[in-house]
Amino acid sequence: MAKSQTELRPLGKSVGRKEDPRFIRGMGRYIDDIVLPGMLYMSLVRSPYAHARIKHVDPSAALEAPGVKLVITGEDLAAMDLAWMPTMAGDKQMVLATGKVLYQYQEVAAVIAESREQAEDAAQLVDVEYEPLPAVVDPIQSLDPDAPVLREDREKKSNHIFHWEAGDKEATEELFRNAPVVVKQNVRFPRVHPSPLEPCGCVADYQSSTGKLTWYVTSQAPHAHRTVLSMVSGLPEHQIRVISPDVGGGFGNKVPVYPGYVCAIVASLKLGRPVKWIESRTENISSTGFARDYHMTAEIAAEEDGRVLALRVKTIADHGAFDAAADPSKFPAGLFSIVTGSYDFKESFVEVDGAYTNKAPGGIAYRCSFRVTEAAYLIERVMDVLARRVGVDPAELRKRDFIRKEQFPYQSPTGWTYDSGDYEKTLDLALEKIGYEELRKEQAEKRARGELMGIGISTFTEVVGAGPSHTFDIMGIKMFDSAQIRLHPTGKVLARLGVRHQGQGHETTFAQIIAEELGLSTEDVLIEEGDTDTAPYGLGTYASRSTPTAGGAAALCGRRIRDKAKKIASHLLEAGEDDVVWDGVSFSAKGLPDKSVTMKDIAFAAYTNVPEGMEPGLEATYYYDPPNLTFPHGAYIAVVDIDKGTGAVKVRRFLAVDDCGNVINPMIVDGQVHGGLTEGFAIAFMQDIPFDEDGNCLAPNWMDYLVPTALDTPHWETDRTVTPSPHHPIGAKGVGESPNVGSPAAFVNAVVDALAPLGVEHIDMPIFPWKVWEVLREHGVNK
Ligand code: PCD
């Protein structure tokens, strides 16, 4: 055990991760490790077409195949009123297709057999006759009034899903009319996929003897899934136990409920045996929640010196066949209206229109806290366009436009109240640390020699921790979170939280928070998450919300324990309660520091020697409803060199200075930043899920959809500033998503900066070498 682990007052220290010994030795217990007696396996039949009418589905040959127990079709589910399920975005989604399929790889039938191999073989035998229809793959064309209507189930006879807006249109127009400078840029954020190492899967175990369903599932939000399942199936909620075992990466992919889950549960209910379903890599990428796919246009109105006045944004959001976005209910475009970022715009008007296309459903976060990555990328990209237009260095331009630290709490023109920040300090630290001035000199020299070197800056603001229940809910369930702490007589602690980590390190960081509050060491505190029969109700881990919500609950729950502990201390110390003081590790009577009692002493007394009339035991539960979200920020700088012959971009340096308020565990935060930067790097340079004109998914595997290896990944430099959140119980803000939110713009800005001498103003992600090579050729560099 690392020495630091035994320390008292562990908050803010790099305590070694308690979960690592199990993960590093391959001893994690993931969904596919769960094997139950009598367990069956399920395989799904999927559509080869993106858009087709289903003429008939004939399961008879499959039913005769060896080992097959059951085949479920869309018609079977329709008979049970389960052919459709609600999505979190207020839409509905087919569980198994009836009538039509709307995307390639859509779920058409489920085959359940004694072994996985038998289920997969038999799935090939399900005879489905399709009549192909023309596919609509472009969201802009899909909104054309003449486009074929994809969703025949809806009353609205168009592919338009929603229109959403924020800000003051009139006031924004007014500023644009009189502005000395206006810049405009179209920016696409490609369709990407979180593609966690462990794909989705579940084991449904219905016991007819007790009427209880135990559902093991790779879930980021077990309680929310239990409630939704109960509402959809009609099973009483206390008869459903959701267990999310170790999760091999989530990244937003494990927030939605997928058709395979419903089918596995139906199969277990029908057969009275456990049913396992584990999807393949291809199934994961091609059919589960994708992210982004935003077609954005931004315009900035500014003064001649680059001081910003107003921002106008129009976006088309491609949601695929069903709007299965995992956003809080009142936010069809997530928190996209944070798009004014770190800058003091006087006015802003933001519009988003959602469109259906023949692609897999989704719109999940992928390390993004609900469309904040799209927003940060857009504003950081367009601020660079403005800098170039007005001829001001991009670092200097940002400083001119930053919200100043005296302006916090800052009211943004689209309605957010930023809790705290010091943007200039963070950028200054980044500029100094990377040696900005020298880099610009080096760049000038290189440019003179015709070499392509670029420096890209991103000074983003994130918004995380949904959230205050007055505004944030998922399908009506308010987004607070919870902690429950129980001290055993020997002073050891079992704490349970309503969130569910997927590798973030909660077993360590939440133990640190609780140990700090109770004057214990991290080793004394065992953290448990992911079992709805034991954990207090919570909304789960995504949107970097665990620290802002459950982290607050853990601290306040610890303080609640301490309140009772103080009463017991006063009894043990034979001192009046007002005379008892807490020094962070023990209680003592005022003026008598030598006589003290620790939490361990008190825990024992709680079960053996409580003051008369006091309820024995020492445990508490806390449901924490935060007053606001938290607004972390950062200043990222990328330095790139471009090979003119091949178009390859080398990221020579990347510095991330993050500010997530008070830090619980610096090593874990650095790890979070490294991981998020690696994903941001992948998005900027390698990841896209393209479709051909028939709607065929062209990258449903890791040969075509690239995940960076250690060899591809640059070396990350990190640092931080600390601007505590004024409203969070320990002053912490979330951080898990910041590096992914902030980094794509830094990479792209660096590439555009390198190519700027050629007249290049923008290049869309992903920046594959061939794309750069083509740009170079267009500009006469490679003939
Ligand atoms: N922290 C500290 N300090 C501070 C903050 C924070 O220390 N100030 C730490 C904590 O405690 C934890 C971590 O760090 O442990 C994180 O946190 P946060 O920020 O709060 O967050 P969370 O909630 O926990 O988590 C979530 C995130 C997300 S969202 C994502 S995507 C990703 C991240 O997380 N995912 C993942 N990261 C990660 N990692 C890993 N390993 N894995 C995974 O999967 Mo979404 O919405 O879902 O899209």
Image (cartoon, rainbow, N blue to C red):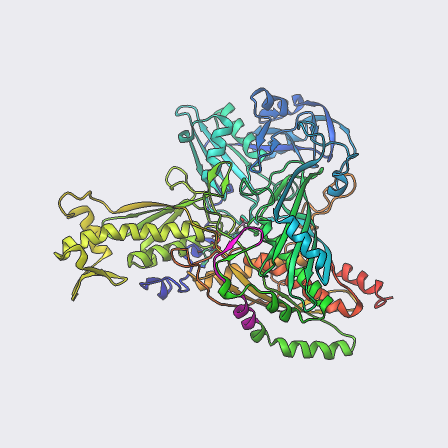
Q: Which residue is outermost to the right? A: 783
* Above/below status of 780 relative to 230: below
Measured as percent of width and height from the top left, residue 303 is found at: 68, 65
From the viewer's side, name the closer residue of 607 and 395: 395
Report the number of discs. 0
Measured as percent of width and height from the top left, residue 94 is found at: 62, 30
From the viewer's side, name the closer residue of 255 and 140: 140
State the residue at coordinates (58%, 27%). 67
Would you say residue 181 is visible in this rendering? yes
Which picture quadrant has residue 42? top right
Q: Is residue 416 magenta?
A: yes
* Above/below status of 193 relative to 148: below
Q: Is residue 489 magenta?
A: no
Measured as percent of width and height from the top left, residue 267 is found at: 53, 27
State the residue at coordinates (43%, 54%). 19
* Above/below status of 248 relative to 774: above
Q: Is residue 712 left or right of residue 27?
A: right
Q: Is residue 18 left or right of residue 433?
A: left
Q: Is residue 72 left or right of residue 238?
A: right
Measured as percent of width and height from the top left, residue 590 is found at: 17, 63
State the residue at coordinates (24%, 56%). 599
From the viewer's side, name the closer residue of 251 and 454: 454
**Quadrant holding the N terminus:** bottom left
Would you say residue 765 is visible in this rendering? no
User: Which residues lie in the magenta part?
Assistant: 413-430
Q: Which residue is outermost to the top? A: 79
Q: Is residue 180 left or right of residue 276?
A: right
**Quadrant holding the C terminus:** bottom right
